[in-house]
Image (cartoon, grey):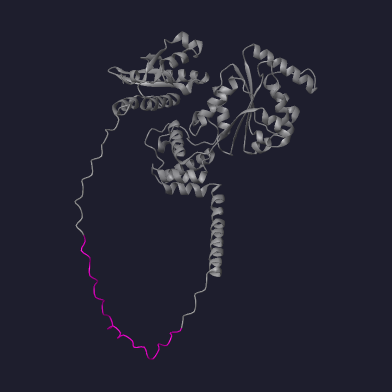
Amino acid sequence: MYLEHFGLSEPPFRITPHTDFFFDGADRGATLEALIYAILNDEGIVKVSGEVGSGKTMLCRVLMERLPAKVETIYLTTPSLGRDEILYAIADELRLEFSQGRMSVALRELQENLIRLYAEGRRVVVLIDEAHAMPEETLEQVRLLSNLETSRHKLLQIVLFGQPELDEALARPSLRQLKDRITHSFRMRPLSVAEVARYLSFRMRAAGYRGPDVFTPKAVALIARASDGLTRRINILADKSLLSAFSADTHAITARHARAAIADSEFSPLRRAKRPALYLGAALALGILIGLALHWAPSAPPAAKPAAAPAATPTAPAPAPHADPPPAPRAQAAPAPPAQPEPAAETKPAPAPLLSREQAQRIERYDSRGQRLLVERIAAARALLAREPDERYSLELFITDNTDPARMERFLARARSLALLPEMYVIPLASGRGYRLRVVYGDFPDRAAALEAERGLPPKYQKEFRTTPRSFADLRRPM
């Protein structure tokens, strides 16, 4: 209903795991890259845990898309599989038919097939979603499957995605052997308020929005608190907030719209229900403290009766009522020494920024046409150029006059499949004719380190690109 109102091409806050809307903030991007590395480098069993709605399934789907073509991906979404059923499910995905029904024979035939695939240069990874709901005997079968290996390599990579109950299950003594085989564990943490703001802006722009941020800071804070930082809840609240603003014929999502969305959500009563109990408990504790204070406070002594003055003792005449006492003589104050002027503090001029305002603006004026990877790597390049001193180095891969954003996006997608994307930076260079694009790799302390990294690049890169170490002073100079 509100797509045209906000200039959107599609709904920005669907709760289905649409991979074009993958948010790599809050460590999601780093976790994804680590998973790709683990799968490509024979790292055994990997575990990813997180609360309901924290984005585990989205991460799993994006992982499937970004693994290179040589990886055979088996995605199991039925956690209730029995001990034998999981073996047959893997065989079905590999289009393998067992000759007998005996498990020992089936395991041997699966191993032979995996050896054949490995000899062809292909890897096999099993992604198990909702693994916390798997029976214990099925988890034990997962451990046995992880034992399929040659003398030097694992034949089957396994990644478990599950809720925190998976951690509790693996803590049982009966599953300690499986736990010992987990080489990497990742936790999908909730988003902070600042990350929620970036998440909302990212989803809006991924859906085609091109204006200023529509969610006000107060609305963001309310959504972050009500959602507990869980992305599925954020999506629900943000969608309802947009609908509320659309109904009010406004483009700014204010606290009023966010409160209406929270009141209409299914999980808001749980949050409100906690408050009366909290207030009641606080009042009860305060009452107990006050009662104890009254009980144990020391009693005031009774007022003493005035003692009768002896008759023979003459008394001084009482002063007249309301008479002020005579002022006491003041001592002559010694004259204060003249104040010495404080030495002026030595002010040091602020260091010049490494990236000037004009250079940053020229980077921002490059039109990336909303290409997600390109936008991300240009922003990363700007941050890198703003912080790295002149004497550090990066490795220039190439400079191109072909600034078509879609073409550069395809290059970055291929770099992502090789797990090189986090170290790839795109620098737009403004010229009289428009722009050129400089692509550099990595951040190194000196030229020797950059040359060493050059030898570790994929052979295809070394063959196609004339790589050159460049200091950050050289990179900033033509901007």
Looking at the image, residue 421 sits to the left or right of residue 179; the answer is left
In percent of width and height, residue 372 lies at 44, 26
Nearest the camera: 409 or 377?
377
Instruction: Identify the image quadrant of residue 161.
Output: top right
Nearest the camera: 117 or 355?
355
Which image quarter is the C terminus in? top left
Looking at the image, residue 139 sits to the left or right of residue 462; the answer is right
Residue 57 visible to the viewer:
yes
Nearest the camera: 476 or 317?
317
Q: Is residue 156 above or below residue 216?
A: above
Task: Check if residue 326 falls in the magenta segment.
Answer: yes
Nearest the camera: 260 or 402?
402
Task: Check if residue 214 falls in the magenta segment.
Answer: no
Q: Which residues are magenta?
A: 305-333
In percent of width and height, residue 322 lies at 27, 80
Residue 403 visible to the viewer:
no
In percent of width and height, residue 364 lies at 34, 27
* Residue occupying the point 66% across, 16% down: 152
* Residue occupying the point 39% across, 38% down: 213
In percent of width and height, residue 110 lies at 72, 18
Instruction: Identify the image quadrant of residue 72.
Output: top right
Q: Is residue 113 above or below residue 380?
A: above
Task: Work out which residue is located at the far top of the displayed protein and give it.
Answer: 463
Principal secondary structure, stretch drawn in magenta: loop
Number of numbered labels in the structure image: 0
Q: Is residue 374 above or below residue 325?
A: above
Instruction: Identify the image quadrant of residue 71.
Output: top right
* Residue occupying the point 30% across, 30% down: 351
* Residue occupying the point 42% across, 47% down: 255
